[in-house]
Image (tube, helix red, strand yellow):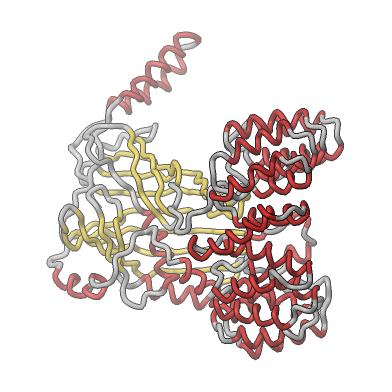
Amino acid sequence: MQLSHSRKTFAIAASILCLSGTFGIVAGGKQLETIRTQIAHQLLTQEITAPRYQLSIGQQYSYQLNYDSHAKSDLRVLFTDIDKTPEAKRNAPSSLVSDLNVKINSEVIITVLAKQGNNYLLSYRFNNPIVKILSKEQLIKQQSQLVTEDLKQDIVATVDPQGRIVAVQFAPKTAEISQTFARSILADMQFVTPNNSDRLREWTQQEEDQNGKFLAHYEAASSFENRGSILPFRKTKVQYFPRPSSTPSRQGKPKSDLTIHPQGEWQGKFDAAKGQLQELTGQETQKIIISNKEVGTDETKMSLKLQSVTTLPTIQPLQTKLQPQLKAPSIPLSYQVSEADAEAQIQKRQLGTDTLESISAALDRAEATRNLQNDYTPLYLKLKSLIYLQPKTSEIFGDRLSIAKPDSLSFQLITGALSAAGHPQAQAALSKVILQRVADTKVALMLIPSLSAVKNPTAETVKTLDQLASTPDPEVTTTAQLALGSVVAKLNSTEAKPIVDRFVQTLQTTKQPEEQRHLLLVLGNVGTSELLSVIEPFTQNQDAALKAAATAALRNIPDVRVTPILIQILEKDADDNVRLEAAIALGLREMTPESFSAQKATFTKDSSVKVRLAILNTLWQAREAYPEVVAIVKNAADKDSDKDVKETAMKLLLEP
């Protein structure tokens, strides 16, 4: 690949660097410092002619690539405290734990195929690639061979004048895993030149890779090689931009915030006279953070060095050969499969070669030899995958659930799998079992929350819970009403309104404080903005239990007026339980400067240890946005008069 660049010598800069060593010997004190300052000023203000790609149709570049990516992840930290998990379970196989190492050594042939408007079509071919994919240091032969063969096929890329890869097109039947690896490598091979400036030392560009769009910073290296036209530069990733969410979260609810922290740099060398990228090498580590917890790292090392440049006598044969790729869909480097397709792929990998018969037999064996020390997570995941991918099996496992004892392993695993699969067939199976076993209070109380946890409730699910919301059994009734509130929150306004109106009317007409308290919690599960005017007056009630329930019910309401209400309750209410509910509710909402200030002040003076502990944990989760939290927690660990607060603060400080 070439860079258009007017020839420029860097003798002055090189001479300055050479002289600095000599000056260091003969000069001292203020004189040395003055010279160093002058040199630094010259280096910082010295303009450099910007590199430019200059691509010609038929040019072919051969690079030697050595690529090593090692990704580790452990999603269990999102669901449990790993440090407190028994060692046997911590080391047990889990689909939530991944350790994948990809090593690729290959010659990469890049050919300029054509020009399309301002952009260029380039083909990338991995010539004689050696691919090793290892999981926990064990070679995965089948996938390694698959990717090896796929990478031998040309990849067509649309590249803009700056060298940014706009989109890629793969040969038909190229495996998804091969496309993923190829896009990752091509993204790391990018070196994007500035847009317009002719002379500059540094610039930024927006680029993208598998993790999304990011801002890259380029600058001339601090040491210049006295090799004529060779220009050394370095590249670092500044930050990733947030991916747009396909399902907007409700304001005030906790965010599923994924952030990526890149570290490291790439070094590049351009031949300005020939306009060629000579090499690109370096190392980068990306830390993956979800909900303030590090769930994984990805360390990549790469060496890309130019071997030769030739010009094809004619480009027509290659263009003809690549017609299948040119007709394939164009996808960006940051392309990700849809949520549904990605989930299906995960479930297929998890299920593997297992069948209804093999999983049913495994469930029978596990039930017969049940041991509380055993980890049945792998079996649960297999069961969930089977039900997810084969919805008709929902009825089969529903029949088994209808006769299972509530304390049995089968009851637990099947209930969880049907709820997690969540499709209409799984919901129908759960609904049927609940209605069949509603007379057994213990069973009903276990199954109702599982049915309400589904992501997209069906009309049948709503009808079942609505029917259960008025049974003779008060425990079943209240549980079903709370579940119905959660389900209604997932419906559109037209479907939800009749049910919500009924709960509101009952709340406003009943005179029973206990029923009022319960209905406030039900409406809190619904959590729509329209309910603020219904719930808020109860925060002023003389009954502390009603105030506490109303305060708790505010946590999910997506209205900016809620946070000030909760702050006032936290600061002024005389009842410990009411203030505790306010502290918990604030912890589930976005931290604002006003909320932070109020919680910080309350933490130092509140008389309730429970309130202070709730605030302590909330403040700690906000330490990245509010760095002074670390000092607050350190002070609590060192000097707090309460033993529980002190111990909790010490544990928080020990978190990674």
Report whether 485 appears left or right of 7.
right
In the rendered structure, the answer to whether residue 179 lies left or right of residue 46 reads: right
Q: Nearer the viewer, residue 340 or 465?
A: 465
Q: At 57% across and 76% down in the image, what residue appears?
A: 460
The extreme top residue here reads 30
179 up-or-down from 620: above or below: below
Residue at 60% over, 76% down: 427
* Position of residue 598 measured from the top left corner of the image (x, y, whole percent): 66, 31
Q: Residue 417 appears at what percent x and percent y?
A: 65, 75
Quarter of the figure that contains the C terminus = top right
Q: Quadrant of residue 66?
A: bottom left
Residue 313 in sight from this viewpoint: yes
Residue 498: give x, y in percent of width and height.
Answer: 55, 63
x, y percent for residue 158: 25, 59
Name which residue lies at 18% across and 70% down. Answer: 319
Of residues 516 and 88, the one nearer the viewer is: 516
Q: Residue at x 44, y 58 (%)?
A: 246
Can residue 81 be seen here? The reply is no
Total label count?
A: 0
Foreground residue among 553 and 78: 553
Question: Does residue 331 lie above or below 464 as drawn?
Answer: above
Locate residue 180 relative to residue 231 in the image: left or right.
right
Toward which corner of the image does residue 316 lie, by quadrant?
Answer: bottom left
Viewer-proximal residue, 478 or 242? 478
